[in-house]
Amino acid sequence: MNEETLEISLVNDLKEIARVAEHIDEFCASQDIALEVAYAINLALDEILTNTISYGYDDDAPHRIEISVRPEVEALVVVIVDDSAAFDLSNAPTPDTGASLEERPLGGLGLFLVHQMMDSVEYRREGERNIVTLKKNKTGEQRPEDG
Amino acid sequence: MTNENALSVQTERNEKAVIVCPVGRVDGSNVGVLESAIRELLDAGQKTLIFDFEELNYISSAGLRVLLVTARRTQAEGGKALFCGLAEHIAHVFEISGFTNILTICQSRSEALAAL
C-alpha cells in the first residue's frame, strides 16, 4: 500500500468544505480505506471547519487552513492547522441526546459528533496557530472490490 | 462523481403529504437551500412532510439542526415530519445524535405513507 500523505490547502470559505470532501473520498478510495471511515473523517472535518470559518475570524481577510491526512498502520491521522482565534475543542460538552423533541437543544451537536466519530481529538496552540489532531482507526469493513 | 457535492431539493405532492427528496449533500455551505425549500412548504400551509433520503449522500449537524426545527414546527402545527430511505452511515449519525428517539424514522417511503 502506498503510504503517502494527503495535503489540502484551503481558504476560510464554507464552500471549500465540499472540495475537501472530494479530496478525502478520492484519497481514501486510493488507500482502500473503508467508506464508513472516510465518512467519519469528512463529517469531523466539516464540523470543525464550519466552526472555524463561521466563528474563528474577527476580520474579513482571507485566511489559509492546512489539512494533512496521514495513514498509519492502524489509523488515519488528520491534522488541521489554522490561524483563527484560540479554541480548545478537545473537551466539547455533551448535548442532552435523551431530551424530547420540544426540549432538545439546537446547538452543540457538531463538536459532539466530532468526538463520537473520531477515536481521538487533540488540541494545542502554537504561537498564533491552532493545531488539531484527529485519529480514526481503520477498523471499518473493507470496501467491496470495484467492478 | 459529477455534482456529488451539490444539493438540490425535489418535492412530490401526494394526497397525504409532500415528499421532500434532498439530492446530494447537505453541509453548512448549502443548508439554506434545504431550509428555504422546507419553509416554503410549511408557510404555504403544508403540515405533513415525508423526507425521503434515498438520494442523500451526506448530512452534517447544520442539516440535522434544520430537520430538528422542522419536526418541531410540524408537530406544533398539528402535523408531522417523517424520515425514510436513510443510508446506513446517515442512520448511524441519527442514532449517535439521539434523533432516532425523537424523530419518526421509517424504512421506506411506502412505510412512511402507511404510517400517516
Image: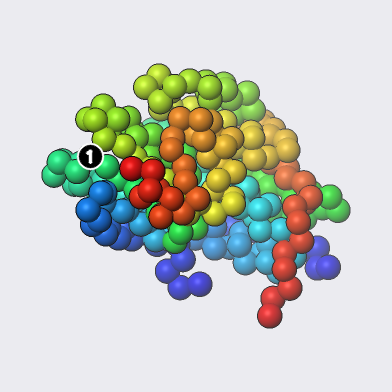
Q: x, y (%) of residue B59?
A: 47, 48
Left or right of B38 on screen, residue A119: right
* Chain of the residue that carries numbered disc 1 in the rendered image: B
Q: x, y (%) of residue B78?
A: 24, 30
Specify the quadrant of the image occupied by residue B72.
Answer: top left
- Residue lying furthest front: B114
Left or right of B106 on screen, residue B73: left
- Residue lying furthest left: B44
Residue A10 in view in this figure: no
Left or right of A87 on screen, residue B8: left
- Residue lying furthest bottom: A147
Picture mark count:
1
Q: x, y (%) of residue A57?
A: 42, 36
Residue bearing mark 1? B47
Q: Quadrant of the N terminus of chain A?
A: bottom right
What residue type is disc 1 on? Lys
Residue at the spot x=25%, y=49% of the render? B16
Residue B115 in view in this figure: yes
Identify which residue, A87 or A24, lies in the foreground.
A24
Model colouring: rainbow
Residue at the spot x=38%, y=39% of the render? B67
Residue at the spot x=68%, y=80% of the render? A147
